[in-house]
Image (tube, coloured by chain):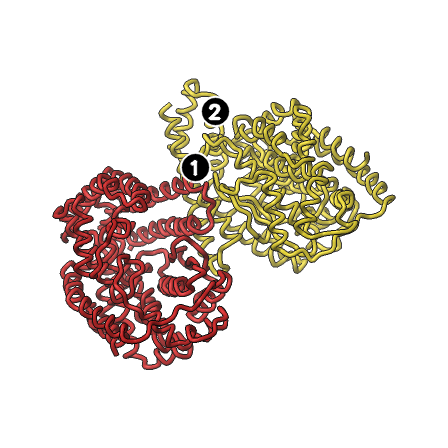
Chain colours: A yellow, B red
Amino acid sequence: MKAYLELEARKKRVSALNNAMGILQWDQQTMMPDGAAPARATVLAELSVLVHEMETGNELSDLIDEAGTQADQLDEWQRANLREIRHGFIHANAVPAELVEKMVLAQSESHMIWREARPANDFKRLAPTLDALFQLKREEADIKAGIMGVTPYEAMLDQFDPGRREVQVDRIFDDLEQFLPGFVQQVMQKQGAVPRPVDPQGPFPVAKQRELSHEVMKIFGFPFDHGRLDTAHHPFSGGAEGDVRITTRYDEADFMKSLMAVIHETGHALYENGLPHQWRGQPVGAARGMTLHESQSLLLEMQASRSEEFVRFLVPTIKRILGGTGPAWEADNILGLYRKVEPGLVRVFADEVTYPLHVILRYRLEKAILAGELATADLPGAWNDMMQQLVGVRPTDDTDGVMQDVHWPEGIFGYFPTYSLGAMASAQIFAAAQRDNSDILPGLGRGDIRPLFDWLDLNVRSQGCLYLPDELIEKATGSPLDTAAFKASIKARYLD
Amino acid sequence: MKAYLELEARKKRVSALNNAMGILQWDQQTMMPDGAAPARATVLAELSVLVHEMETGNELSDLIDEAGTQADQLDEWQRANLREIRHGFIHANAVPAELVEKMVLAQSESHMIWREARPANDFKRLAPTLDALFQLKREEADIKAGIMGVTPYEAMLDQFDPGRREVQVDRIFDDLEQFLPGFVQQVMQKQGAVPRPVDPQGPFPVAKQRELSHEVMKIFGFPFDHGRLDTAHHPFSGGAEGDVRITTRYDEADFMKSLMAVIHETGHALYENGLPHQWRGQPVGAARGMTLHESQSLLLEMQASRSEEFVRFLVPTIKRILGGTGPAWEADNILGLYRKVEPGLVRVFADEVTYPLHVILRYRLEKAILAGELATADLPGAWNDMMQQLVGVRPTDDTDGVMQDVHWPEGIFGYFPTYSLGAMASAQIFAAAQRDNSDILPGLGRGDIRPLFDWLDLNVRSQGCLYLPDELIEKATGSPLDTAAFKASIKARYLD
């Protein structure tokens, strides 16, 4: 027990540093004056090194081993906490410090070059540094794979969605790849046969949009005494334990962009806020990986908020605050706008139906990159071919082609799948919740989120990291993660 | 050299944590949602413990000793840095961890009780915990005094104004105690013989006052790419290296309060911003204690901004932004308002002439407390008697008497003198600058702060902690710190 309690004490300290970094990173995107950027980068780098030191080393390894021999003295949550501590240790400790340092430098360089090469449509400029970074990531993946006894790609995926297997991802993505292209055609045909929905005409002043954001966040019970809404270049959810901060950006010509971003980030924030308070500061009290996290944001954004019930409830509020009148502001038209399906080049603008195809493309390519089967120079061509084949459109430049995402230039491999696995999970969880409580959709229709959130609190949020992601999903929904609920949901929404 | 460089590396890391804490503390006062307060306190406490661990221990002590034996290999700045590192080590390491912990608990308890006892005018409730805290502070002061070879009070003072001796403070304060009471009478007589200045009538909307704040900060060259202005319950200057953040609070009935707070905090911020950039992250690159810090805020607030030249320059801007017209908005009237002298009970509302008397009272009493010569139960009576004697007014309750300041309930001894030593220094530095450059006052008259700031950059800001506070003042002004310039300044301002 003593070894375990010592581990808890150490994790509490690491968590203090992580919480500090969470606020500093939020500040960096929202409040920090531009000139402070280099100094802030130094502070964050020093704190990261400190955390890394606290999360590695033989002493920690010995403590984990010792606690493991006394696991029978631990209760269920403590055992799960120890499992998560061990998991974190493996990821932190697997890679030699020298390789970590090389990766940090290469990531920082390629990110910097990407920021200039992307708008200049100059992939050739980015390629050499990207190539060097890919080589380092291959080394990292191979080392971790050896230690963890998984494939190199799984070792990457495991950072974001612990325990996830390639075979599952393949099964889900193969299924979607079979199903979606034809489905997209069907939906477009159906949508082409009716009048196009009309865009409400702006401008929509930022102050009014902010008021609408706060109003919607209130409907969802956002804990304003434990969180904030601010403006940043990119919407995100961040902050610290007990202090969940989300951001959005406002487009005065289109209020829906910010509204949906706010709802999406509110979903993330409410998940964080609903994690088990008594386990704050410990790994078992943290969010259950990025697939689950994305399931919670998409559940709010795509499942709940775009339900006919909720849109009909919300439209009068939107009209009141933004002062809209006329046919463009009718609930049916707003629903039509929310449900427009259209293949496009850019992932972040994609609708929920075509989105998984963008993710599948990245999944296939990053697996090939990690396996050394795709030369960096061939990446743009491979991207364009696959985009044509999966989504049915072909990029005319690399700006909105292979260079559109920051992930690879930042050395992030294994993250992309969690977007669509999260979409699958959101549909599956929402369907399970409705089976358990038939008042969830009617609740949304009267702006009452409690029936849905009571279910989520009990089955998802309060569970922290007690189980592995897949165990949690199966316990909550009664079946392993698959595509059935997602397919049923989009069929009902777009074809019925 | 190796030992010294290792010390620099360690200090750089400590500085990253201190910068992180600076932003977290700023956030706590400006942005943080209320419910996050307990979690934030935990994060800050953990970071403080980390810093304390990094700043103590035998290994560090050995490094300092070793670097000391190689001091001939160091340049002037490195030697000063080593001196500051040693100074910080003594303060951090002198007191046993057990006593530190007791003090932290006692401070936190007495601060908490003070927050309730003060508005309830219930000193009896505060007395026991205050008494226990005083006992711990006596222990701390005695231990440090023994190690440092100074008096117990000097050991406390040394935390805020390194190297300061009681005998100097006594000489300055005795002089002021002789001079000021009679001077106050003379000024009041003179002011009583002319019509009272008239208060401009509000309300002054917060947005307009904020615009005025930004305008004035721009005149002073506040680095908005390396800093911010926000709103908080109490005006302060904080943030991090390269990221100086000030706050104010707005009273819609009185725009001068916030205006002067903004100028005061801008003075603090510009000092921080002007410290030697190449020494950021090292003790020698930090501000030279609280007397110097206060001298920089008061120099801007009391010396420069209340000069007739600057007031005449600024009044049209004030009128333009706040939309004022009529006699109350004339420069002579505004000058009259700024220069009203009136004895009062509360230090933070005191004018520059009576302010030192409030400080002298606290200095005398806290010395007696530390020496064990004044029982806590007798404190309110001693306070009231001395207030009567020094300021000429007698408190009718303890709320605005002995309980008005947070310092003692927070265990802060030795800080009070720096307010008035800073006032002496500000007058002395301003006078020296004018002797060196006769364009300083004319510059203020045309809103050109450069002549003054060029001098301050060269003689004060860029010097960091290269010298001890008194050495810096003497090098910059040609004489040791005394009362002459201050007395000359108030004579010229209030009697001529």
Which numbered disc flags the more N-terminal residue, 1 or 2? 1
**In which quadrant of the rendered image does the N terminus of chain B lie?**
bottom left
Image position of B158 with respect to B134: above or below: below
Residue B192's x, y, as percent? 27, 72
Q: Nearer the viewer, residue A82 or B344?
A: B344
Nearer the observer, A152 or B27: B27
* Residue depicted at x 53% and y 45%: A245
Point out which mark residue B472 bears. Answer: none
In which chain is the residue bearing label 2?
A
The residue tagged 1 is A55
Query: Amino acid type of disc 1?
Result: Glu
| Three-letter amino acid code at the position of disc 2 | Trp
Q: Residues within 10 Å of mark 1 (few under 14, many from 20)?
A: many
Q: Which residue is mark 2?
A: A77
Q: Residue furthest top?
A: A72
Q: Is residue A19 above or below residue B202?
A: above
Quadrant of the image occupied by residue A64: top left
